[in-house]
Amino acid sequence: MKRIFLAIALFASLSLANAQTQVKSVDASRKAVESALSKTENPKQAEKPATWIKLGKAYLDAYSAPMGAGWIGAPRQDLALILGEDRPSSEEWVEVSGTQMIKAVFPTRNYYYNENEILQMIEVTEPVYPDALELSLEAYKQAASLDEKQSKKKDLVTAFQTLDNNFTTEAYTAYTLGDLTKASYYFEKAYEASVQQPYAQIDTNAIYNAALTSYMLEDLGKAKGYYNECLALGYYGDGGDVYAKLADIAVKEGKNEEGQQLLEEGFAKFPQSQAVLVGLINIYLSSGQNTDRLFELIDAAKANEPDNASLWYVEGNIHLQLGNEEAAIAAYKVCSEKNPAYEFGYIGIGQLYYNKAVTIQEEAVNEMDDKKYEALVNQFEEALKACIEPFENAFAISQDPQIKVAVAEYLKNACYRFSSEPGYQAKYEKYDAIVKGL
């Protein structure tokens, strides 16, 4: 899930607004909470929204206090000056979600810096109150319920937005550190904060990620509920992923017809979605239904968008999934003819031949008969060489740097095999340099 996998990049945008704000000490924040709590015990004071706003703010300060003066996006060198005597007891390189980071250990928290020494994540290890954010949310909800004249609307809007951001940051931190359960919980709380009046800016990203993490935890009932809320809000995830996940849940519940209906609905809206397409193919094949229905769906999409080249790419993918190699190549070629600037028709042909070569190579490795082995090697080289031209066409027309690097990786591997033949060594060196970013 892209929104979760890009968590570290999102931290900065969520937290930059709080950069270099004055942070209360742990003791001061605790005393502020105690003082604010005492006011809520006074019946007259407890009727005032300002009393609960003060308590909510005190809990927010208590949440932030153990984090020190650091903020997401801060350079490590700058923080060394700002923190002064507040220094880490140790620092070491650690791997976090497949990324190398510098972990700086402080008495109340851990700072995680990326390879460029930019603070990416703060993990509180000694909170003032373990549930400070939740307590803050409840205090602000109470304030909102008492603010009939909306005299505190501006303060409450800011508070609920801040809580939404803080819960989201905690969710991404938990996810990045491998705690799915905690991540799911905090995404739910972020969604809860976002819908509170008078803020009421539904955080669709939070509800989507609450659904996704619940799905990953195999809590299908909760995932289904959140995914259905996504649909009700007109939020479909990355390329219709919500439909694919709901269909998968339906199939796991033994409701194949419901799953099929969801996938067909998703396909109508997102015909390019690989998740929806693969789900449709699997459900038709597993149920023994006529796969012609898949082509009826794609033909209906073409009727609505006859000049949409990507629909022929999707048709090629359907044929490929069904084992119809020649029909797949024909569809990919039409895709390229429809829009010569759309690289995926060429990519489809290139991947088909490249994957075919890999399959033949694996077969050859296990072949003991010399003649059969030699024949397989010839087939392997023929398929591998066939992928080069379409990949080079894709590389030439693509305007997406990431796609160009991915295609260059294929080309580097293929050209290396033929580096002893004229021209291929130069091609190998060209694409190898691109992959290495030289």
Image (cartoon, grey):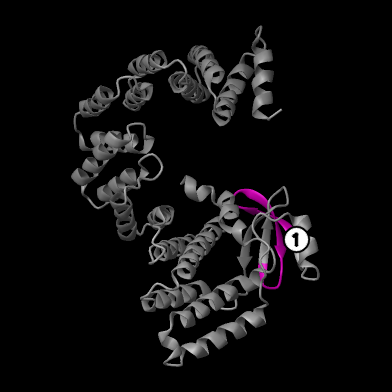
Q: Quadrant of residue 330?
A: top left
Question: Considering the image in quadrants, where does the C terminus appear?
Answer: top right
Residue 36: within the magenta? no
Instruction: Give the tally of numbered discs.
Output: 1
Up/down of 432 relative to 240, above or below? above
Up/down of 380 relative to 32, above or below? above
Q: In the image as oriented, which residue stretches furthest toward the top?
A: 422
The amino acid on which the numbered mark 1 sits, given as a three-letter code, is: Leu
Instruction: Estimate the x, y position of residue 178 in percent, counting from the top left.
Output: 54, 58
Up/down of 286 relative to 156, above or below? above
- Element type at marker 1? helix
Asked whether, in this view, residue 164 is left or right of residue 243, the answer is right
Which residue is pictured at 38% across the width and 15% down the height?
A: 338
Region in magenta? 91-109
Q: Quadrant of residue 247?
A: top left
Up/down of 92 relative to 6, above or below? below
Judge by depth and name the residue closer to the eye, 76 or 279: 76
Residue 106: within the magenta? yes
Judge by depth and name the residue closer to the eye, 19 or 349: 19
* Mark 1, residue position: 79
Judge by depth and name the residue closer to the eye, 111 or 253: 111
Which residue is pictured at 53% across the width and 57% down the height?
A: 172
Which residue is pictured at 75% across the width and 60% down the height?
A: 79
Asked whether, in this view, residue 12 is left or right of residue 40, the answer is right
Instruction: Estimate the x, y position of residue 295 in percent, counting from the top left.
Output: 25, 25
Instruction: Estimate the x, y position of residue 62 in percent, counting from the top left.
Output: 59, 76
What is the magenta segment's predominant secondary structure?
Answer: strand
Asked whether, in this view, residue 33 is left or right of residue 275, the answer is right
Query: Is residue 371 in view from this perspective?
Result: no
Instruction: Estimate the x, y position of residue 30 in percent, counting from the top left.
Output: 60, 83
Badge 1 density bin: few <14, some 14–19, many ≥20, Cα 10 Å: some
Query: Is residue 228 in view from this perspective?
Result: yes
